[in-house]
Amino acid sequence: MTAFATHEVFNQSPPFEGVDLFAADRPLVEAVKANGGAAAEKELSEFGKAWGSAAMAERGRVANENTPKLRTFDSRGNRRDQVEFHPAYHELMAHSAQAGVHNSTWTADGRPAGNAAEVVRAARFYMAAQVETGHLCPITMTRASVAALAMQPDLLAKVMPVLSTRSYDPSFAPWWDKRGMTLGMGMTEKQGGTDVRSNMTRAVRDGSAYRITGHKWFMSAPMCDAFLVLAQADAFLVLAQADEGLTCFFMPRFAPDGSVNAIQFQRLKDKLGNRSNASSEVEFVGAYAQAVGEEGKGIRTIIQMVQLTRQDCSIASVGLMRSGLAHALHHARHRSVFQKHLADQPLMQAVLSDMALHVEASVALMMRLCRAFDRTPHDPAEAAYMRLLTPAIKYWTCKSAPPFLYEAMECLGGNGYVEEGILARHYREAPVNAIWEGSGNVMCLDVLRALAREPDAATAVLQALAVETKSLPGAGEAVAFIGKAFRRPDGERVARLAVEKLVLLSAAAALNGVSPRNAELFAATRLATNHASMYGAVDIEPSDTRALLERALP
Ligand SMILES: Cc1cc2nc3c(=O)[nH]c(=O)nc-3n(C[C@H](O)[C@H](O)[C@H](O)COP(=O)(O)OP(=O)(O)OC[C@H]3O[C@@H](n4cnc5c(N)ncnc54)[C@H](O)[C@@H]3O)c2cc1C
């Protein structure tokens, strides 16, 4: 501690750095194991140490303080359309790529890797999100793009040798000449984001390719090597209703002849958070593109990608909450108030243990979902779980992160609110995960869509959850409530109510497979009664409180 001429600095918590983000997180270690990822413990611990280091925390801070800059023109008035990032951003990208966070769920030829690849990669994504989330935008989109590219096998075969490497190559060059590549996505236009059918961007055939003219109101990570873009294909515009032509296209930064493609960035968004990541407004001026999947099947194609980015929104949100909890608990164990550490004050214990319970259930649920992603190709029951619960879990985890981080921030008092610490950044970052890739209401409507389209599969998921939770308080009532609410003719009106109950039930079931005692506590405080609007407004026994906090951070 420093001694100034006027005073000494003491009773401040040391930085939460030099931590193994894997080993220090028992709920994570156990959830990875419970969902088939135990064999990867050693490599996850290495990743945890690298991302829990002071050097990585510093990269995160610097990449967010030195935000990306759009260089639209050069000094002679020629278009440049390039975005410059601070070296710290590139280092974060290189670290994530080197660990395969952008591709490890795929084989080198673009098939699902299986063998708990989703669970293991999710653990990495979750740890990286605790340190810096902005750079994870191109990382998640690259990983997810493979699912959409699979609809165009010849293109997938060409791209995979570059996409499947562990190299990060930030050079502005044609993707086929690079050591590694990243992909972005352009769907949202000014007149409609959720309602992509209202897209006005048009694609006109040009030999075997297309020329695309129009705009995107949001297109993040503009230095990606290619984008999957939705546009209306021309044949359909003549023959049918405009919205029937919506097609998915692969739009590279360089056309096949090596010239820079006609992708013109207008400006970068000035965002609440997510500062290290650039999000552009863009125009396409007859830009070269190739179709991905059939003409008119754009939504069906891009949804393959979006399902995976939704999963990642959820993982990142749980990672942000975990980081909030860990920083709060670490601080409370070092900071004394009225001659006692904060962590030993009963009311602070009530707050922290309730938060720990929320994170523990979220981690168990997220890992259970990733297991479903791992098993979906071979197991229809897991495919049904994945289809019904991905939007539900995205809804709950992403929407619960902002208030959670606000509470975590308050545990650090004034230090939590200033920009030197990471919690202010996490707090500004958190809301975006609920907005992009389908906002809250849209997720609830997607759950209703899954129920309507595959009612038997959805009912089987609910029945399995009922069996897994049958000994837990409030679970039987929750199952009955969900069944009834989803059958109501005005189901859309009560969708948030029903989806929230469904997620709480699923979280209790997932936690039961990791820590039965904590599943009981979770059910008692969230299913048997409605949880109060503030953390800590629960009655958890001191022995359970101690156990929860010990598990959260030894
Ligand atoms: C930082 C950032 C980066 C982004 N990057 C990208 C990107 O790279 N690529 C891309 O394509 N997009 C991107 N987006 C856009 C994002 O996906 C959209 O903003 C989002 O899908 C919502 O669309 P919208 O903004 O048009 O809102 P709207 O579609 O107008 O929705 C507004 C609200 O209405 C609700 N709503 C919609 N339909 C219904 C309904 N039927 N019933 C009840 N409520 C409803 C929604 O839940 C939402 O809360 C980004 C957004 C942000 C903030």
Image (cartoon, rainbow, N blue to C red):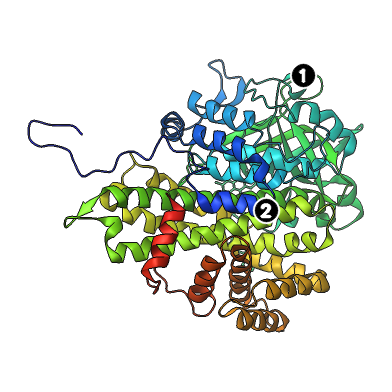
Residue 15 vs 490, above or below: the answer is: above
Residue 496 vs 434, above or below: the answer is: below
Residue 438 vs 186, above or below: the answer is: below
Q: What is the x, y in percent for residue 249?
A: 80, 40
Identity of the amino acid at label 1?
Gly
Q: What is the x, y in percent for residue 258?
A: 77, 19
Please name whichever residue, 539 or 174, is drawn nearer the observer in this view of the structure.
539
Numbered circle sitting on residue 221: none
Image point 49% across, 49% down: which residue? 320
Residue 59, quarter of picture: top left
Image point 8% across, 30% down: which residue? 5
In-image side of 11 versus 299 (left or right): left
Q: Is mark 1 within 8 Å of ligand 1?
A: no
Residue 202, quarter of picture: top right
Disc 1: CA contacts within 10 A as few (<14), some (14-19) or many (>=20): few
Q: Residue furthest left?
A: 6
Identity of the amino acid at label 2?
Asn
Image point 67% across, 53% down: which residue? 35
In-image side of 246 versus 208 (left or right): left
Please name whichever residue, 239 or 307, is drawn nearer the observer in this view of the structure.
307
Q: What is the x, y in percent for residue 132?
A: 49, 39
The quadrant the N terminus occupies is: top left
Disc 1 + disc 2, Cβ < 8 Å: no
Q: How far apart are labels 1 and 2 at the CA level? A: 46 Å
Q: Residue furthest top?
A: 76
Residue 92, quarter of picture: top right
Disc 2: CA contacts within 10 A as few (<14), some (14-19) or many (>=20): many
| Residue 190 appears in view | no
Q: Residue furthest front?
A: 543
- Residue assigned mark 2: 35
- Residue assigned mark 1: 258
